[in-house]
Each structure stands twice: as structure tokens, then as C-alpha cells.
Amino acid sequence: MGTLAEQLILESIELKKPVLDLGNCGLRGTEPELKLLAKCIDVRVLNFSSNWVNDVVEERFPLVFSSNTQAPNHLTQLPAYLPPCLHTLIAQGNSEAPWSIKSLQPLLPLQMLKHLDIGHNQLMSLKALENLPKLTYLLASHNQITEIEPIAALTQLEELFLDTNQIDNVEALTGLHQLKRLSLMNNRIAQVFALPKCRRLRTIWLSYNQITEVIIPKSITEQLTYLDLRFNQIEQVSLPWLEALPALETLNLGGNMLNNIPAEILKQGLEGIKNYLVSVNKKTKRRELNEAKLIFVGVGEVGKTELTEALSQPNYEFREGRKSTKGIQIKHWKLPNAKREDKAVNFVANIWDFAGQEINYGTHQFFLTKNSVYVFVWDARKDEAQSKFNYWLHIVTLLSDKAPIIVVQNKIDEYHTDINRQNWRKAFPNIIDFVKTSCKTGESIEALRQVVVNELLKLPNTHEIWNKDRFAVRETLENRPDDYMGHKDYMRVCQEQGLSREDARFLAQQLHDIGVILHFKDAPALKDTVVLKPEWATKAAYQLLDHPLILEQGKFTHEQLDEVWNEACFDDKHHFLLGIMERFELVFRLNNTDEYIVPERLPVSAPAPVARPDNTPPLSNVLRFEYHYEFMPKGIFSRFICRIHYLIKAQLFWKNGVVLKADQSQALITLNDVPAIKTIQIAIWGNQTSELLSSVRQHFDYLHRQLHLGKDLLHEKIPCPCEVCTTGKTDNFDYQHLQNCLQDGDTHIRCRNRTRMAIADLLHGITNQPASLKRLLHLIDTDQISEFFAAADQLGKQDRDLNVLRNKFMHEGMSDYQYTEQLKVWVSRAYRGTRG
Ligand SMILES: Nc1nc2c(ncn2[C@@H]2O[C@H](COP(=O)(O)OP(=O)(O)O)[C@@H](O)[C@H]2O)c(=O)[nH]1
Ligand SMILES: [Mg+2]
């Protein structure tokens, strides 16, 4: 009887067994009986080890044990002869007592070999493996390998284990496109380590090296699910790095010197690490907005522009007689030494410097925004009336929703005087301070700067937290040289900076609000363009309003715009700019003509047919209504004309008046802005006076609302129609008062001329609009066209005209200015004859 090994070999030859287990046979590899192995032509699997890893299952290593029970083997070499058709060879030494195989030479004839386990030996070279291209599994851990160049030839390799060797260079692995698992634990891989480009790599063990950074080539990032980096010298893990590994399920980072992830987070595994990095990232990516509008207002020539220079220019020097500019100038001013709660802040004030020309007041209402600080400048040589204290303080207070105002008396080097500060402050509690300055001598400029900076820092919206990507978008927009860009282009910029579409839209609104861009998202004709330089649009507006042609006649044609906007910067944008003008209600297009009207620039006197007194019926047959303003914002009447233009009768309009016609009724509406209490008077005659009045009032209601004119500044009046009042001393009843009296059960009231009037008669024809009408008009005003049609249907108001309009909307996506006007005409018709 020979050795156990001999018995097992012979048995396997005889029985043609494919698996030959020679583990625990006390072998050294040099025994003569091992020559018999050459005859084992049926053996596919040959084992010499006491135990081995059969295969890796889900990153675990289940051990298989030899079924023999003699002394463990201790091979000093591979047997010189091996079964020729071997697929799998297990020749792994014991971890406590490594073997001493040094050469793989005997493997050379094994062209079928796929699986080789040669761990815990004394291999220094893998050279012989070059000739075994069919290998799919190689375990050569715990050897003395320094070089793995020969492995480059093993293109079928799927699993490669080379732990505990002396490898420092793994370039040879690039190109092993079948490789799924790679283990290089405890080698000499140092510093920045680029993972080999193996497309199918899913699992990598790299622990116990000296890696400081792992670079992940794009080709493998899609697949990688398991990455073990324990006990290296990694100091930082970044979110982008993690995000480049979308499939990663496990990341082991223990035993590194990470300085950007706390230990307790590391324990939470990949999800915990990711969440942590995301939250940190958000925090560091965010900062306060710290930006606001600083708006200078006041009449012309008081030194507004000079003051903006004095405040914002570090090396400012007063220069007499600088040329004044038209329109609006916008400057970006980085506040010096701004501090909030003792912390320095980078704060930018966008200074809006208005030209004081009276004739441009109409446009101010669109730029006097909330969340801004105002500086109202006056010059002591002009008194309070000349300086239009009342006007500016009122308009700013109304439109800005009581934003802080600093009242500055400038040019005190020439003259100065005192005003009753208490009174002004009582009327306008939002006045923060009164400062007296001189740009010429520099007096109190620093004091003014302090007050201004303080107020800017206090504005609540400047504390708003913004993401860095939003700032990035902003910066991109600012660095563009263009005056405007397409909305699509804007969205692309946002997308590039990582903003969602919704964020991008919201950002546009905010940038509009802080005065960085102009974007009219609610206006279909305008929303496709984002104005990057608001000055560009205002310049266009002033160029039009101040053009000799318009100053003379108050009107122009589309062709004439080529002359008005003849600069290259306005090319191709006439239509858009005209749209802005229409939107701002500075201009309207005359029904069915190519003519545009600028009401503010129309002649003051009425055309002849209106001026003739016999044109209107006796006052007793006229329905009258009036608005009395204790404060009247400029441009209100011109805007009304623009709004109501679709009812204008035969070109009967002038600067302070308009004649309307609707079916059988006519209206004469005039502005009287001479007296202290300015008035707008409405006179309507014909068959359907009540309906026409209702249309007219709807527009005034809208304007009053928009200008924040409340009951304290505005009174609705009904002129007394008694004979005495209509022929001589006129009296008015307060509309609200009449309604109250009626509600209290009164039936009659006496006018100043002692005529007893029935309250019901006085109120006859002056109905408040039905809520449904208001709603329809509101939907049009706010560009909710689909909702408008739905509401009209719900009210049962469909007719042929509405269907025509609806089709237009559905098929052409119409909802430009002209179109919405048509809708309004339809509404006013639909409501004629209905009582509130
Ligand atoms: N003496 C004097 N002149 C000033 C002062 N500030 C501005 N000016 C002059 O007043 C004129 C109008 O100034 P400007 O800033 O263009 O006024 P704006 O129309 O309100 O912007 C210019 O000639 C300035 O040089 C000042 O403090 N003292
Ligand atoms: Mg100026």
C-alpha cells in the first residue's frame, strides 16, 4: 500500500473522477508518486490545501475544507507534473504556516486552467501566467509579488486577489475588461491612486495601503458598488467624488484620517456619509443675499447724481457742472466696512439714480419698488413746494409700501434752511432721518453714508439665504455684455449652474425685484426676453417719450420707430420695447390703425368737437361720477386712457381728457389737476350709462389699487344734480356716505344749496360691479387666460364672439396686449344690461 496521495491519485484515474482532493496528505510537492498526476486526464479540479475559498459569494469568502485528515501539506514547489486538462488548481499555503512555492513553471502546459489559488506562498513573479490566457480567477495573495506586469495578458480575468504583496503599480490591470472583483489590500499603493480602467469592475478592496486620494475613471463609475478603503491616508471625501459613483452601495472608510467627516457619521455607512456631505455642502454653498436697491429721487438739478458719486466713489472729487443724464443710471456699490452683528458682510447696493425730468414721472411707478431704501434729495434754494416734497414722499411711501426714506438737503455750501421735520415725520413715519450735505465741501457725506448703510443692512429681504448656484447664475448674467437675452438662453444658464426649472423661474422674479434684470413673466409678448441691463429698456422709453416727433404730436407709427430707436442696440427689438411701453401704459395703439399714441405727450387742449359746449346734453340727463384726490400720482390719467383706448370715440382724446363711446352711450372723462384737490370727472349720457360707468370705474379701481391709493387720499363723489348745483355753486355727495345713509334707513339728503334729494335717485345708475365681472377682468389682467374662459363658461356667458376669441387663444396661443383688450371689450359687452 502506497501513500494516501498515491491511493487517491490511482483511485481517481481508475474512476475517472473530475475532482481530486490531495489536501492534508503531508505532501511537500517533491514526492515521486506525484508524477502519476500526469495521467489524471479526467481531473479538472485539483486541491492541495487544507481549506480554500471556493468562490466569492457576495463579498464573502466561504471556506471549503479538505476531506483528508492526515498532516497538512507544506508544498515547497508545485509538482512537476499536473493533470493536463486541469481547470482549477488550489495550492494555497496555510495562513499560519505559509508554503514556499516560488515558481509557477509547472503550470505552463495547463492551457485549460481557469481557476488558480496560489495564496500564502513565496512567489515573487507571475511571469509564467502570461501563457495562461484562459484564467478567470487568480488568487495570489500573501506572496512577495512586486510586479504584476504579466497579468496584463490575462484578459479573461474576472476575479483577482493580490492582497498582502508588495505591489505599488497596477497599470497592468487596465484593459482587463472582464474584471469584476479586485483585491489589493495591504500592498504599497501610495498617494493619488487612479483605479484601473476596467469597465465591469464592481468590487474593490484597497484597505491597508497608503492611498491619500482615489481617482475614479469615468469608465468604471457606472458599475462600482463596493469600495473598501479602510486604513489608508485619505483626509477628505467630497460630495462630487461620491456623486461620481452612482451605483455605490458600500463604502468603507474606517481607519483613515478623515477631517471632513466625523467618526460617528462614518459608522452610518454610505447613506449617512452622503447625507452629511449634502447638508454640509448646502450650508457652505449658501450665504445671505446682502443686496438691495438704493433709490435716489427728487426733482432735477438738486444733486442726486453727484450724491451717488460722493457716496460710492472712494476717490470722489466734486466737479462743477457735470453733464446730467436722462433716464435711469444704475451703479453697483460695494458697501465699505459693512457689519452686521459685528461680522463683516459683503453687501452690494444697486443705486438707481433717476433723472428728475418732470415729464418722465409716469415711468417711476414701475421702478419704485418695495424692499429698497430711498434717498429723497432737495436743494434748500428751492422750497418744499418746489422740491415737491409732498409728491415724492407720497409716491415713494405708496409704491414702496412704506420703505425707509432719508431726506437729504443738499448744496448746503450755498444755502441752507430748516424745515419742520416733526410735521413731515408725522405725515410720513417712514422717514428715517434728515441729513444736510454738500458734495462740494464733503460735509456730512460720511454721516449720510452711515445712515444709508445702516438702513440697507436692516432691510429684511437682504437676509434671505441664497445658494451659491444662484449667485453663479447672477454672475454669469452680469458678465454678459449684452443688453438682453432670450428666456430659453437664461434657462440654459440656470441649468448649467444646477438650478431646476422652477428655481430658475423664481430666481428671475427675485432678480427682477432687486433690480438686476427686467423680466415680465406674466406678459406673453414680453416673457421670452430677459433684459440684462434695465438701463437699456429705460433708455429706449425715454428716447421715445422725449423724441421731438413725439413731443410735438404725442403719436408715432411703427415705421417711425426706426428713427426713434435708430441705435444698433435697439435693432430687432422694436417690437419688444414697444410691448414694454404698452405694458407700462405709456403708449397705446389706436384701434385698427398703425398709429401709436402717447397720452402724456398729447396736446393739453381738447379737440374742437369736444370743446364745443353744445356737444353734451344738459347735465340733468347726464350720469356723473368723480374722483377727488388728496394726492394724485402722476400718469394716472394717461394710464387710464391707455387702458380704455378700445372704447375711444373717433380719436377724441387729449392730454387731460377722452371721449368714449359704447353702443348707445358716450362718456366724457376729464382730469382737472390744477386745484389742491385734483379731480377726475366722468360724465356719461345715452341709453346704457350705468354699464359704461361700470367699465370706466373698473379701470380706475385697478389703477387705484395698483398705486395703493386708499380712502385717506381718494374720495369717490357724486355731483349733486339739482338745478342750483348744476347752474352755479356745485356740491358733491360722498359716494360712501350716501350708501351708509341708505343703509341706516335715510331716504333723503340735502345738498349745500339746500335742495332735498332722494338718495336712491342719486345712486341710481352707479352700481358697483358684480363680483363675477370683477373676477373675469382680474383674470384677464393677470393673464390667466385659460382660467378666464373656464370662468366665463361657468357663468353661462358663452356666445359666438367668445368662441372666436377662444379659438384664437387655443390655436395661436394668443394673449398679447391687443388680444387681452379684445377680451375686455367682450366682457364689457357681456355685462351690459346686467345690474349688480
Ligand atoms: N454747490 C454745490 N453744487 C452741487 C452740489 N451737488 C451737486 N451740485 C451741482 O448741481 C448740479 C446738478 O447736480 P446733479 O447731480 O446732476 O443733479 P440731479 O439732476 O439731481 O442728478 C450740478 O451742476 C452739480 O455740480 C453741492 O453739494 N453743492
Ligand atoms: Mg441726475
Image: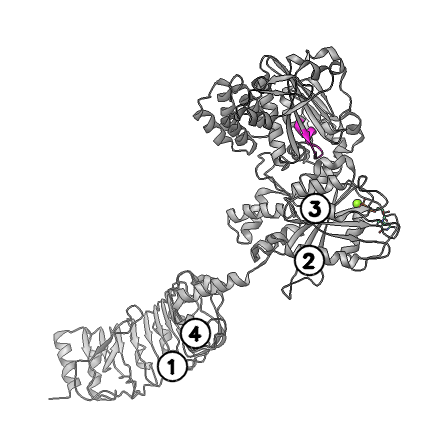
Q: Give the numbered dot on residue 618.
A: none
Q: Amino acid at mark 4?
A: Ala
> Distance from label 3 to label 1 (Cα)?
85 Å
Specify which label sits upstream in the sequence, 2 or 3: 3
Q: Quadrant of ligand 2?
A: top right
Q: Which residues are magenta?
A: 628-640
Q: Please tell me which residue lies in front, 26 or 18.
A: 26
Snapshot quadrant of residue 336: bottom right
Badge 3 crowding class, 10 Å Cα cut-off, few under 14, some 14 to 19, many 20 or more, is few
Task: Find disc 3 in the rendering and name its residue.
Answer: 426
Residue 296 in view: no
Badge 2 crowding class, 10 Å Cα cut-off, few under 14, some 14 to 19, many 20 or more, is some
Task: Find disc 2 in the rendering and name its residue.
Answer: 454
Residue at 74 percent of width and 57 percent of height: 449
Image position, residue 643 (x, y; %): 63, 27
Specify which label sits upstream in the sequence, 2 or 4: 4
Residue 54 in the figure: left or right of residue 543: left
Residue 833 in the figure: left or right of residue 200: right
Q: Please tell me which residue lies in front, 51 or 492.
A: 492
Task: Find disc 4 in the rendering and name its residue.
Answer: 263
